[in-house]
Amino acid sequence: MVEIKTPEQIAKMREAGLVVAAIHAATREAAVPGSTTKDLDEVARKVIAEHGAKSNFLGYGGFPATICTSVNEVVVHGIPDEKTVLKDGDIISIDAGAIIDGWHGDAAYTAFVGSGHAPELLELSRVTEESMWAGLAAVKKGNRLVDISRAIEGYIRRQPRPSTGKYGIIEEYGGHGIGSEMHMDPHLLNYVDKRRLLGRHNPKLVPGFCLAIEPMVSLGTPRTEVLEDDWTVITTDGTWSSHWEHSVALTEAGPIVLTSPDCGKAKLAEYGVTTAPDPLG
């Protein structure tokens, strides 16, 4: 069953989303050559404490940290540690979440460490981020879940191919419902699977529907494997990947990107979508 939120609950999720946005801002500034991924986790812990929030990552299924730090070929769920030192030219995807009064926010971004990045890495991140926004723009009353998947995949497939030959849309992981828990129904694929066009796999979008939309794209394979720590997910061919995510709520007045400082207003306007007013004013 999909959890439908009230306006008051969406306002609480907006509060949590703004904490996530603050984590992103602080970790982005700290993601410099010489920093460890453990350093970034400490930054996130401090932001959460300053806002009186709770971490929804720490302890989740036994996860030992406050954020996920996924460097280069790591797609998602990288565990922060003191051994992973960021180097000039690395890319890192940082996934962060927060809880306010029992309501969750969740978002991720890809950052460039230092300088000297290959153009195809810059384009990989751009394509992944823009596919996320294409998916967010499809969060409309009357659409179905697959319309979001179609928008994400369609955007990626329309882009010029990288020198590696193709973009790999990660198959094993995708977006999800969010609200009173971090991960809830429905599961959102970042591509269209014709086997999931009916029934509970493809619900209609209605006001109160909340999702975390998160495309993950590599410069090669769509397939992944999990390392011995039972968390870290890498591409099977070692190609580097990008991960972008925002949490969004659909209201009677339109979508609200809960984890974007401006509710997604500027970016969604590029897609001809008007966002609902910020529930926090």
Image (cartoon, grey):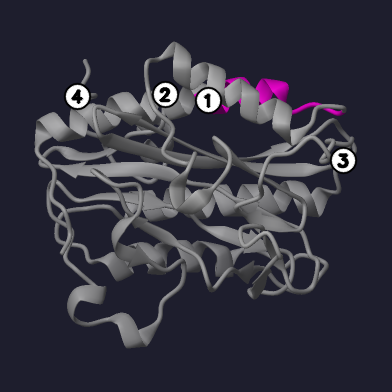
Q: What residue is shown at x 90% (from left), y 38% (from top)?
A: 116
Q: Give the residue pinned by disc 4.
A: 279
Are there few (<14), some (14-19), or many (20+) residues within 10 Å of tag 1? Answer: many
Q: Give the residue type that dot 4 points to.
A: Pro
Are there few (<14), some (14-19), or many (20+) residues within 10 Å of tag 3? Answer: some
Farthest residue to the top: give it. Answer: 50
Distance between the Cα atoms at labels 2 and 1?
6 Å
Q: Give the residue pinned by disc 2.
A: 19
Q: Nearer the viewer, mark 2 or mark 4?
A: 2
Distance between the Cα atoms at labels 2 and 4?
15 Å
N-term-proximal mark, 3 vs 2 = 2
User: Residue 41 appears in which quarter of the rendering?
Assistant: top right
Q: Nearer the viewer, mark 1 or mark 3?
A: 1
The magenta stretch spans residue 30: yes
Q: Secondary structure at mark 3?
A: loop
User: Residue 162 appears in which quarter of the rendering?
Assistant: bottom right
Q: Give the residue pinned by disc 1.
A: 23
N-term-proximal mark, 1 vs 3 = 1
Q: Give the residue type that dot 1 points to.
A: Ile
Q: Secondary structure at mark 2?
A: helix
Farthest residue to the bottom: give it. Answer: 195
- Along the line of sight, which residue is nearer the eye, 264 or 21? 21
Distance between the Cα atoms at labels 4 and 3?
39 Å
Q: Give the residue pinned by disc 3.
A: 89
Q: Give the residue type that dot 3 points to.
A: Gly
- Along the line of sight, which residue is nearer the eye, 227 or 107? 227
Query: What is the magenta range?
Result: 23-33
Q: Are marks 2 and 1 in contact (CB under 8 Å)?
A: yes
The x and y percentages for residue 31 are: 73, 28
Q: Is residue 190 visible?
A: yes
